[in-house]
Amino acid sequence: MRRLALLTLVIPLLSACGGGHDATATKRLLVVVNAPFSSTPYLGRAIENGTRLAASQVNTTGVRVGDEHYSLTVRTMDTGLSPARAVANVRRAVSDGAIAIVDEGTGVDASWRLAARRGVPICIVFAGGQSLVDAGTRPDVFRIAPTDHGIAFRLAEYLVPKHLKVALLHDDSDYGTAGAKELRRAFARDPTSVAIDETLPADALDLSPQVLRARRAHATALLVWGRPATIASAITAARSAGWNVPFYAPPTGADPFVRQQLADHPTWVDGLTFAAGRLTAEVGAGPFTGFTARYVAAYGVDRVGVHTSGGSDVTEPPETPMYAYDFVNLLASALTKAGSTDPAKVTKALEEVTVEGANGDERAFNHSSHEGVVDDDVYFARFHDMTYAPVKDDPLSATLPTILQTTQ
Amino acid sequence: MTRLAVVVVAALACAGAAYGAQRIALPSPIAPLSAQPPLAGGASSSAENVAHSITASTNVAVAIDEAGAPFAVTATQRLDVRGLGDYFFTIGAPVLAVRAPAGSASAPGMRTDSIVWAGFNPGERLLVARATLEPAKAAVALPIRIDVSGDTITLENATGISVGSFSADAPRAPLLAYLARLRAEVGHGRAPLQTSIPLASTPANERVTVTAPLHVTGAIGPQRIDVMLTGRARIHGHGRVDLRVEPIEHVDEATAASGRALLREAIRATLTLARANQYDEFLGNPDPAGASRTVYTYRTASPPHAAPIAAVGNHRRTWVETALAVVALATALAAGAALWARS
């Protein structure tokens, strides 16, 4: 009983001592990760891990803001891919004093206004919808991820000169619908290269009728813009019908789910070409390889769940984590540039700073563009034996090295 | 041993001084003589390992009011970029707004005091930016000043600058050879190179005033204008000003007889080239070895008028009005007090 009484006296005293110590130590700034942890855990974790990795590196020296030093604290909030939850999370993040929000993109159409009231920057690191980011009307929204617009125009730029008759297939998900809109714009320059424009049901397991319609329209290539499941189903429908038509896809073509779905027929994946943000820069694979090593040391290897013909485990390069990582580094640089922890001042400073990205490329925003991945940074890669390599018939892609995607 | 060291050091110092007295570097024909132009620190490239070959051409449109004062400046820069690979260019400028006109392969970005370009060049790429500049900051780097006063329009070359130089006796042959080379390089549009020449006497410091020659063409009202402006020109007439101004990079044939006079000619030629080169690089070029050209146009226009200030804001009461107001106020107070007392 005496001990208990003693403890009740000592514990508050110790806590008080601790509090006193914190007051003189580095101050903390809150970075919130707003992502779909429950519905697409892989994506949520990827964004969280990239954010945490950068924060931990920033915290080794701290962020200098005027005469003070700050460290970054990361807190996660689950959107469950629900816009309503995403908006509620942003409201809470803002009221909790977040200095920035790293966001998957769901609900930003509504949440940006809440963040804008306090000037809190939101950086989207996954969704590519064109309307999400506008430096003029949504001054607090930034993005480090390829845009749907950039992907669509680069695909058109790549495919039109090949004189293919392209079937534009997109699913009816938000992602597919937004992509279809951009594809129509991109291919409007040369409508003769489009054989058919078809909507696919996102949940359908069998897309044979739609693929057959594309075949009857004399398509010589299928460009499928949709969720990974849609892409896998379209490939299955074509290949099981013996149609060896080339497939093209947006970044979701590289999603591990496509390969997992087609693991029983690995050759069906061969030749699938997708567009995505480049993982390396002119300086070569060194910076990205270094980033991957740090990422793997912290969080382990992301296994795709399939094997090469030689039996090696296929791994997933940390692309989405890279974007979150780059944003946190830009944020740290902007804090120092702003000389203030006022989120509105930090948002303005984000337009003025440049950092070297995880891939060795310059990463920056400016007053007129809040896009951290320019359209020129979209490259093409083709699958072979469950791993992919940059194509050689595109000027940018031809300069890029192949990233290691198997365990040694 | 210490003495030996001192002797050796002294001998080396003397040799150095003697060598220094024999040869001297002429001024660079491309180094800027003042902080600007180019505006706001000029242009730079920071794209990893890639060195692009860039030709820059810029049109600067200056809107002037009836008195000749500039009130709006826009610059359209075309960068013809050659070479495969990434680019990240920063073009210094006091920019208020920037956009890409038709024909540009990409859209420029804007930061405080700079235009930014980032992307991948597949081999050849034309980047065009049309920037609205802060008039006050851009005007100080413009090559001519225009003053309209009644029927007299004065055009003044504003590029003049006083810089440090030197004079000395020098052998003619190397100077003649250098001037001929300089003339050929400029004639062929190649970047002129700096050189050093031998001297025959100790150089003496002096200051020279250097001006970039400007070819001014166009019209003032109905009058056609075509002058080479090195100082000031007064033109009698009136009407709208519509002038095109081009810095001229040119080297005259050598005429001086003595080596001393020839040296003076060579120094003036290099400094004049440097000054003209500065005005050809109004917005700079991210490729330090790339060619740059700038054409300036000055046109009379109507400046945007500020909204008229409401008359009430400027209204001041006369003493009579003030006295009446005081009396009225006092009467009202007295009446109010009387009413309150009786209530």
Image: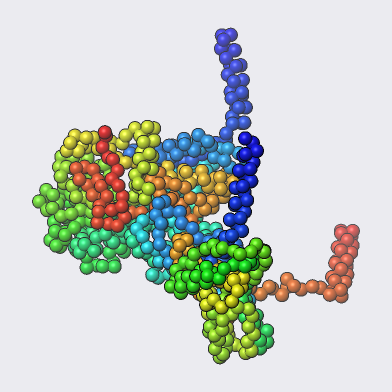
- Of residues A23 and B77, the one drawn nearer to the viewer in this rendering: B77
Query: Does A65 appear above or below B256?
Result: above
Residue lying at the far top in this picture: please name it. A2
The part of the image, by quadrant, that contains residue A321 is top left
- Of residues A382 and B92, the one drawn nearer to the viewer in this rendering: B92
Q: Residue at x 60, y 16 (%)?
A: A10
Number of marks present in the image shown: 0
Residue A400: in sight, yes or no? yes
Q: Residue at x 34, y 38 (%)?
A: A41
Residue lying at the far left in this picture: please name it. A242
> Which quarter of the figure is the C terminus of chain A placed in?
top left
> Which quarter of the figure is the N terminus of chain A placed in?
top right
Q: Residue at x 46, y 43 (%)?
A: A328
Residue A172: in sight, yes or no? no
Would residue A164 appear left or right of A154 to someone viewing this image? left
Q: Residue at x 41, y 57 (%)?
A: B51
Residue A33 percent location from the top left of the image: 44, 41
- Of residues A346 and A39, the one drawn nearer to the viewer in this rendering: A346
- Of residues B176 and B122, the one drawn nearer to the viewer in this rendering: B176
Would residue A372 appear left or right of B276 to someone viewing this image? left
Would residue A209 appear left or right of B334 to someone viewing this image? left
Residue B226 percent location from the top left of the image: 54, 85
Query: Does B188 appear above or below A296?
Result: below
Query: Does A366 appear above or below B139?
Result: above
Residue B174 percent location from the top left of the image: 52, 68
The part of the image, by quadrant, that contains residue B258 is bottom right
Query: Does A165 appear above or below B257?
Result: above
Color encoding of the figure: rainbow
